Amino acid sequence: MSAETSYYVPAQSRWPIVATVGLFLTVVGAGSVMNASSAGESTGMSWLTFMIGALIMAYMLFGWFGHVIQESQQGLYSEQMDRSFRWGMSWFIFSEVMFFAAFFGALFYIRVLAVPWIGGEGANTSTGELLWPEFEATWPLMVNPNNELYPGPSALISPWGIPLLNTALLVASSVTITIAHHALKDGDRGKLTLWLGATIALGVVFLYFQGYEYVHAYNDLDLTLSSGIYGTTFFLLTGFHGAHVTLGTLMLIIMFFRVRKGHFDKANHFGFEATAWYWHFVDVVWLGLFFLVYIL
Amino acid sequence: MSAVIDNPSHDDHEHHGPTKGIARWLFTTNHKDIGSMYLWFSFAMFLVGGCMALTIRAELFQPGLQLVEPEFFNQMTTMHGLIMVFGAVMPAFVGLANWMIPMMVGAPDMALPRMNNWSFWILPFAFGLLLSTLFMEGGAPNFGWTFYAPLSTTYAPDTVTYFIFGVHMMGISSIMGAINVIATILNMRAPGMTLMKMPLFVWTWLITAFLLIAVMPVLAGVVTMMLMDVHFGTSFFDAAGGGDPVLFQHIFWFFGHPEVYIMILPAFGVVSQIIPTFSRKPLFGYHSMVYAVASIAILSFIVWAHHMFTVGMPLAGELFFMYATMLIAVPTGVKVFNWITTMFRGSLTFEAPMLFSVAFVVLFTIGGFSGLMLAIAPSDFQYHDTYFVVAHFHYVLVPGAIFGIFAAVYYWLPKWCGRMYSEPLAKAHFWLSFIGMNLAFFPMHFLGLAGMPRRIPDYALQFADFNSISSVGAFIFGATQLLFLYLVIKAIRSGEPATDQVWEGAEGLEWTVSSPAPYHTFSTPPEVK
């Protein structure tokens, strides 16, 4: 970025409308896949719509970000532009925090209020007696109020195995990305490549373990999406986190290739920083998950 | 008013003026183009949602079922609410923000112009998807705009899936729009434009944008939970699996209450611009206005369960949410006091923007007071889910949000298109809207207090008179909006040329540029003293 004085207002761009069409086809496809499979109908066309939409989205992301990177390389961006990007990314991460807050809030409400109430706590004695008199409110909920409709899990995942390991992996990856960032600021490209690569490796291993754990939960523990509220909150919270780690890892991989291409310098590397911010964010969410979902 | 009109002499060093044809609108990065698209889109949705409202009022004109099936009636109430909230009111304010914020803070454009265009273009597709459900098997969503589980999960029509993805798209659009507004306000202000010199419209939008970013993801979360319950066997809202339908209401209203302030705060901002102009006095209590808006925004996060007094919350919950809700009356009172005090001993004139603003202050206060009545938990047990609630929120949304938008359009239209609207027609629009809207919504208070439930296509005979009055008022109000469309088009095409300052008492950066405002304003930032 050079010392461009006036704020860069881009000329017309086709990316927003491409993005809209891609998004639209993706969600229409996804929606009709779900409706068709719930109704037991053929999903061929729906998948096709979804895939076309997703491909357009991928094309758009490469094109749009590629365009922004080119502009940056051409020195069109001033420091003020840099600050716009920083505000944009910060508030985007805040919106993600609020998205997770909804799911954590649901977990607290269920654990602290809803499940005990179904069990007849407080003023809810008759609720318990009339609805499911046999039901005992415990957490984790192994036997659901209607255990035929929602058969509870037979066992749970111990926090001290893979989850603890995954915690170590993600915390370590937060350290490695910071080392990489410092290397970038010192202009040490070799060190940067090494530690950025290490971060990616840690992310990938985390995802592998998470996938392994899911398979284990489904096959051996009867812990599934439909095993009642424990499985519901467990898979939604860890699943959305895993999706965010996947996205973060993809971002890191792209940063890796950009570094290899010689992008970024000591002072200007917001793309890298934004990725690092995002990576720290998924790390912090994981710590919340580890304590509140796995341990407590 | 000085009649200096300097339209030419500004395509100077910016090489890209508007291009011709559809490409201008599809690919634009210009905040004025995008603002116009938002406003036109919003008006189209206003008419669509309005037709649905008129379907409802036509059915309710007389007791008994006459025009539509109850099933379709439910689809109408649902779609009317969704379209008015997400399609008419919110995009209208985003359109005003797009047009005015860069001009008011002395910025060349919005901070992230391409993303700005994306935010807009998502909307027609999202609402296309939502409206298309009307023609699908099983019909459109019929569970009310608040889409309470299990109506929206276990008992929902198949189209709920498209509803959910439509809401996701609107959420993406709103969040990106809000990020853009915040980045513009925090980063693009001209030198000297300190935070406490910003026009109140900018302040209210800054706070609104914060609310949007805080709660739209929560809405995305709750519809995602619905999607999982409907298609993937989870039990968020099913007590049989240990979940709770009341959980839905908590998460929804954690979004929903800030959402109602998202729809009203920018209107507060608009009125705070207009009343000083037509009183020819500075705004009374600028600082307290800013702090009041911020307080209202903060309080909006801790009052959500006042929408749920009758679900069987513990007493402590009822009390907490009751008192927290009543606290909101304090900063709101500060605002109403300041607006009135601004007018006190001013040299008032009553052009259309001012008429709508004064009506806003009076009628919004009525809506505020009925809100206070509803905030009292033991009274709410009586009013809950009656027409009293319908009367309350229509009083804050129609003469509140919608009148705020009309006031803003009349106030800034001469700046946008360089031409004046016809004042007599605008006054007719105001008075017909005012009469129609009060006829439509005031009797609903009585209906609700007498016990008529909301969201039903038929009612007991003793409610007949007030319902027919209400329907007549609704049709007057609805038809009047065609007059508005006509007079806006007439102004754009053949209105009298407007001066730069347009209004005698107007102050602020937007009035220092020519009318119509040049395609690119402030390529070099102005100095603000």
Image (cartoon, rainbow, N blue to C red):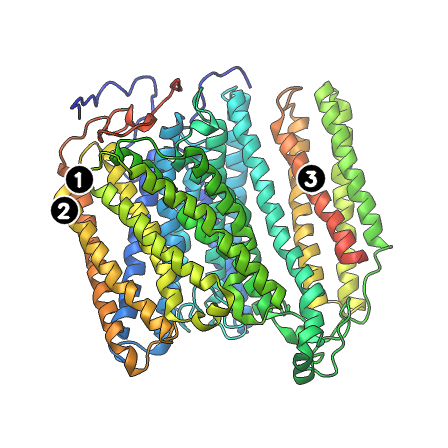
Q: Chain of mark 1?
A: B
Dot 3 crowding, Cα within 10 Å, few <14, some 14–19, many 20+ = many
Q: What's under tag 2, amino acid-wise?
A: Leu
Dot 1 crowding, Cα within 10 Å, few <14, some 14–19, many 20+ = many
Q: Is residue B61 visible?
A: no
Give the left or right position of residue A279, taking residue B74 as reference.
right
Query: Where does residue B405 sit, x and y in percent of width and height?
Result: 31, 46
Q: Chain of mark 3?
A: A
Do badges 2 and 1 share one subunit? yes
Seen at 33% across and 72% down, the residue is B447
Please report contact status of discs 2 and 1: CB closer than 8 Å, yes or no.
yes
B442 lies above or below A149: above
A50 lies above or below B72: above
Residue B425, disc? 2
Residue bearing the label numbered 3: A279
Q: Nearer the viewer, mark 2 or mark 3?
A: 2
Residue B421, disc? 1
Image quadrant occupied by the C terminus of chain B:
top left
Do badges 1 and 3 share one subunit? no
Image quadrant occupied by the N terminus of chain B:
top left
Query: Where does residue B13 sit, x and y in percent of width and height?
Result: 34, 17
Do badges 2 and 3 share one subunit? no
Q: B417 or B397: which is nearer to us? A: B397
Residue B388 lies in quadrant: bottom left
Seen at 29% across and 63% down, the residue is B441
Q: Chain of mark 2?
A: B
Give the left or right position of residue A213, taking residue B376 as reference.
right
B527 lies above or below A96: above
Q: What's the CA distance linking mark 2 and mark 3?
A: 57 Å
Q: What's under tag 1, amino acid-wise?
A: Tyr
Q: Is residue A204 visible?
A: yes
